[in-house]
Image (cartoon, rainbow, N blue to C red):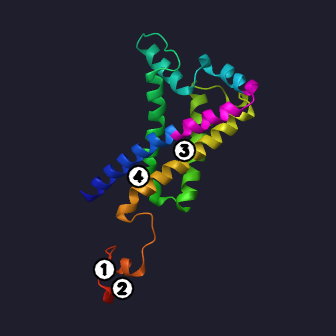
Amino acid sequence: MQATATLTSDLAKGALAGAASTWVLDRVDWMMVDYEDPKAWRRTRDVRPNHKDPAHNLVDKAAEAVGSEPIPQPNPAGIAVHYALGIGPAAFYATVRDHIPGGPLGRGILLGLGMTLIEDETLNPAMGLAAKPQRYPWQAHARSVVAHLVYGLATEAILSVLDYPRGRGRRRSHSEQEAGGRVSRDPRRT
């Protein structure tokens, strides 16, 4: 029962962290677009299938499967799918992060790099949701790496804050370890 409660709690915390981190990722990505060479941004948009981001292309594929018309971008369904693509991996990550070496900083970096490599560079092109990686300008790849690193670090930071009350993620003193994590308020027992 305890394991199920912990799993459920970790999934919920991960979903919350994923939603917040996706919001942060978007802010960072759009800030970089604002400072990017306009020609590079135009090339990025031009090589995208249907000139849409992967989430909106995924919604288009689902609409096509049920006989509906493609959606415009932006669209609430596309934005919801974009957030789901950030929430799902963060929820999973929350359940396994205690088994990943590297401490909070290293784990956050691994999550961000993993999202870039797995999602942007592999799955999206393989599913036809994005063009092949070599078709994009280098700026698009750099933005992806930076934005996903921010996502990974934000996810780990939020999870660390959410875990703090139960003592996970912080170093316990020797007396806490002996007491099984319970802190004695009796100064003679420390």
Q: Which of the two discs, 4 and 1, labels the residue nearer the N terminus?
A: 4
Neighbourhood count class around disc 3 (C-alpha, 10 Å): few under 14, some 14–19, many 20 upward: many
Residue named by callout 4: 95
Q: Nearer the viewer, residue 104 or 116?
A: 104
Q: CA distance from mark 4 to mark 1?
A: 30 Å
Q: CA distance from mark 3 to mark 2?
A: 40 Å
The amino acid type of the residue labelled 1 equals Ser
Residue named by callout 1: 184
Label 3: element kind: helix
Q: Are marks 2 and 1 in contact (CB under 8 Å)?
A: yes
Q: Nearer the viewer, residue 13 or 93?
A: 13
Neighbourhood count class around disc 1 (C-alpha, 10 Å): few under 14, some 14–19, many 20 upward: few
Which residue is painted at 66% across and 37% down in the image?
143
Of circles 4 and 2, the one toward us is 2
Q: Which of the two discs, 3 and 2, labels the residue nearer the N terminus?
A: 3
In this picture, which residue range is highlighted in magenta?
24-40
In the displayed structure, 149 sits above or below 60; it is below
Residue named by callout 3: 151
Q: Which of the two discs, 4 and 3, labels the residue nearer the N terminus?
A: 4
The amino acid type of the residue labelled 3 equals Tyr
Q: Is residue 2 left or right of residue 84?
A: left
Q: Quadrant of the N terminus?
A: bottom left
Q: CA distance from mark 2 to mark 1?
A: 7 Å
Q: Name the chief secondary structure element in magenta.
A: helix
Of circles 1 and 3, the one toward us is 1
